[in-house]
Image (cartoon, helix red, strand yellow):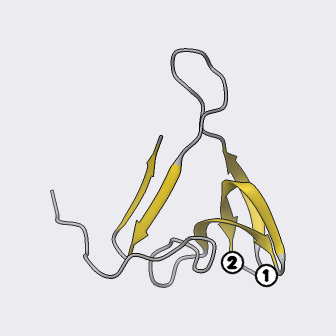
Amino acid sequence: MTAALSGPAFSVHDIPFSTHGSWFGISPVLAEKTYAEDLHLVSHQNGMHAVLRLVPLDAATGERTETRVEATPGLLSWTG
């Protein structure tokens, strides 16, 4: 197991979570000035395009649940 890179926390609303050189990121930003409530796997190849929507569900009820997203350069946390 390797340790996650540390660094300053940032908002995925401002900076997509991804690794250097990646064509994919995780972000609520779907395109320029277009935001979604949910996080999405987005492609950065030839612009920004949503590939997969991530919806937080309560394991007991299957209903949508409130979550909090925290990101540092080496770790994305999605807690509810």
Q: Residue at x 51, y 71 (%)?
A: 17
Q: Position of residue 34 (x, y in %)?
A: 84, 71
Q: Residue at x 46, y 77 (%)?
A: 10
* Circle 1/circle 2 CB separation < 8 Å: yes
Q: Secondary structure at mark 2?
A: loop
Disc 1 marks which amino acid? Gly
- Point out the image quarter for the N terminus: bottom left
Disc 2 marks which amino acid? His
Of residues 61 and 39, the one nearer the viewer is 61
Q: Residue at x 67, y 57 (%)?
A: 40
Q: Position of residue 75 (x, y in %)?
A: 35, 64
Label drawn at residue 47: 1
Assess disc 2: are there few (<14), some (14-19) or many (≥20) residues with their C-alpha within 10 Å of its C-alpha. Answer: some
Q: Position of residue 58 (x, y in %)?
A: 55, 26
Label drawn at residue 44: 2
In the image, taking residue 1 as reference, residue 14 lies left or right, namely right
Picture quadrant of residue 39: bottom right
